[in-house]
Every structure is written in structure tokens, then in C-alpha cells.
Image (cartoon, rainbow, N blue to C red):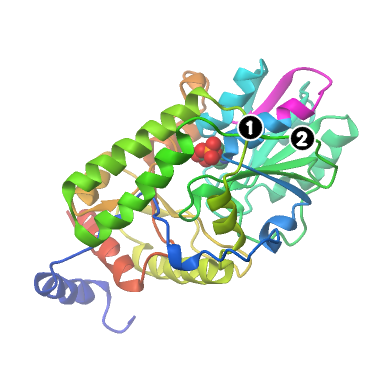
Amino acid sequence: MEFFGKSILNCLRKITIGINKMYNEIGSEFWIDKNNISESANEMPAWLNKFGNVVLTTSGRGALSLLLDQVKPRVKKALLPSYICDSVILPFEKAGYELTYYDVDKYFRPIDIETIKNSNTGIFLHMGYFGFLTNQVLSDTILSLKSKSIIVIEDVTQILFSDHKSPIENDFVIGSIRKWFGTPSGGFLASYKSINCELLDDTSDFINLRKISLHRKIEYMNSRDKYMKSTYLSGLKMAEQILDEDVKPYKVDQTSEMIIKSLDNKRLQNFRKRNYEFLAYQLSGLNGIEVIFNNLENNITPMFFPIYIKRNRDKLRQSLIEKEIYCPVHWSMPKQLNGCLNDVTKNIYDSILSIPCDQRYQIEDMRRITNEICDFAEE
Ligand SMILES: Cc1ncc(COP(=O)(O)O)c(C=O)c1O
């Protein structure tokens, strides 16, 4: 590959594109793969059990609310990273917490450790990003916070399938499972302490809307019927609105529990790693694009392939959408952080783009993405 050089490969692939016109869309919501559901799978899987006692909820937000119902911190204050999704902020706000934020660098490593150590907070929340254990630098800090009876929570949503070499001693772990594969609902709270709870069933339309919409998505992927697409998209949007309004903890539904317990996590891990490595090889060194993590160590399972686009991020994103390649932005800046970000964090929000590399895709799909991004970088 090296021998030909990237620009000759570029010409070759342009010819291939001309021949091969019928594409599937890449990215966006998962669909439910009925072939991978086993009704007899009833054990909590090892990839969740490693976090301690596990309670499955419908969402990550629900898991956080459940946790906040359980704890009595020394002060009703929480310290969160300033690079964050607004759905993590929401349960704290609804529970009446005063919130402050700490910054991370462009590789998502928390900075200003002394301020974190000296903060007068009741809860400290930390997380790794995109599969990478960027919060490992906090190991000592966390011990120091715990010695002051500060409750330490790790949000493992984005590092769910990566293995910690030396796990951080958290009081609680929460996560959103539904971001990794097709399931109507899925979040969890875990701890090595006991968790006392009687969760209610979710009686809102959230689960049903998600179930119907994810089934419609697979019908769309087979039929390419545009009407089907607009109905599942509006169903999914409505489901998210329901979740934004009601962040209370609910029990995971039966279908989702079966999907979670029968997941082939090794396949998920292998596909993601292989796809990531292809993207890293093809996209490193491109003009105007910065690959954030070039090396994928063995214990890492990536969630996405994150890059910084130095100029015109939204233009690139739009041109990919026109090719039916849907790359999310993690995340839009939460309104609560308006005016209180340093330049580095602001720049993360303004220039980051997440490229899908998940288990639905083959190398050919990854090649389609890199071809488009190479064209953009050459413009
Ligand atoms: C890091 C992180 N934690 C928690 C959540 C909340 O999960 P859910 O959408 O399942 O409530 C999200 C949602 O995007 C997230 O990105």
C-alpha cells in the first residue's frame, strides 16, 4: 500500500466509485438485528459485571437519576468535565445540584488537577472519551477526593468495551448502553456497594417508539423507501424528546435486556478496532484534518473515530450527508456552558467530528468515508 502512495490510490478509487453506484447509508441509529437475540441468555454479561453489582435502566440519564436518588453527598454540588453532553447535566439539574466544571486538554485529559483536588464538591464525575482511557491520569486525584468523602462517579458510556489496565476506584459507574448497538433502551448503574432499588416499568411511549422506529430502520435499509426513513426519523426524535423531559429511572424493557445479554461483544470489539485502524492509516497526515488518537492499543475499543477539522467542519459534515454518510458531532455545546469555556474546550466543540467505525461496517464502507474526506482535504 505504502508503495503506491495515497494520491495514486485516490485516482484508482475514483474509477471504482464510477463503477459502483448503489451504496448503503453509513452511520446514524442502529437497527435491531433479530438474528442476534437469544432468549436463553439470562446472565449479566462479563463486560458489565466487571463494574460490580449492575442495575439495568432504560437510559444513561435514568441511571444517573437512580444514583442521585441513592446518595447523600456532603454538599449538594457536583463537579463535571466541561466537555460533556447536555444529557449528563440534566439529571443533576433536575435533582437540584449546583454545578461547576473542570477543563480537559485537546486529548480530553483533565487539566488543573490541583483545582479538582481542592474543590468543595459533593460529587465528582469523570469519563474517558471515544473508547480512550483519557481519565486514567486521575487515579491519584480520585483517591484524594475519596479521602475527603467526595462521591466519585465514572461515566463509562464511551469506554464501555475498553479494558482498564488498572481500574479506577469509583464509588459508582453509570453508562448508556444503547449508543453501541441496536437496542430499544439500555443504560446501567453499577457499584461494588449494594444498590437498593425497585425500578418501575417505563410507561411512557419512549420504548415503543424506539422499538417501532428501529424496526422501520431495517425495513428502510432493505427497501430504501424514503417515506419509511422519514417516519423512523421522526419516531426516534420524538423518543429523545420524551427522554429529555422525563429523566426518572425506569427498568430496562425485556427485549433490550435480551439483546444486551446476548451481545457478541468480541465481534463488536474486533470490527471496531479493524475499522479504526483503517481510518487511522488513511486519514493521518491529511491537510486540515487532525487525527486525535493515532494509536489503538490492544485494550481499547473505539466508539467512533474522532477527528478535528481545522476549517469548515460543518461544510464537510454536510457534504458527507449528501453522500449518505452521517457523522455525529459529540457534542453541541450545552447552553449551561455558554461563556465559561476556555479556548481549548471551545475549540473541541467547534471542530470535532465523529466518524462511524462500528460493527455494522466493512472496510469497503470505511474506504467510502475516507475517499470523501480525502476529496474534501484536497479542495
Ligand atoms: C457520555 C454520556 N453519558 C450519558 C449519556 C446519557 O445517555 P442516554 O441518552 O441513554 O440517557 C450520554 C448521552 O449521549 C452520553 O453521551
Question: Answer yes or no: do the residues labelled 2 and 1 have beta carbons within 8 Å?
Answer: yes
What residue is shown at x 68% (from left), y 56% (from top)?
48
Check the picture and name the quadrant holding the N terminus.
Answer: bottom left
Residue drawn at x 63%, y 64% as measured from the top left: 41
Residue type highlighted by circle 2: Cys
Marks 2 and 1 sit apart, C-alpha to C-alpha, by 10 Å
Q: Quadrant of ligand 1?
A: top right
In the picture shown, does residue 254 fall above or below 202? below
**Residue type at the position of mark 1:** Pro
| Residue 27 appears in the picture as rendered | no
Magenta segment, which residues? 68-81
The dot on residue 112 is none
Quarter of the image where one finds residue 364: bottom left
Residue picked out by circle 1? 249
Measured as percent of width and height from the top left, residue 92 is found at 64, 23
Question: How far across and down, in percent of the image, does residue 141 sit?
Answer: 79, 40
Q: Is residue 338 left or right of residue 250?
A: left
Asked if residue 103 shows in the view, the reply is: yes
Q: Going 25% across and 62% down the picture, which residue do you hit? A: 222
Circle 2 is placed at which residue position? Answer: 197
Q: Is residue 244 left or right of residue 316?
A: right
Q: Residues within 10 Å of mark 2 (few under 14, many from 20)?
A: few
Q: Does the stretch in magenta take in 327?
A: no
As drawn, 65 above or below 3: above
Q: Is residue 74 magenta?
A: yes
Q: In x, y percent, where is residue 196?
A: 81, 36
Callout 1: helix, strand or loop?
A: loop
Q: Nearer the viewer, residue 152 or 214?
A: 214
Does the Cβ of the disc 1 residue fall within 8 Å of ligand 1? no
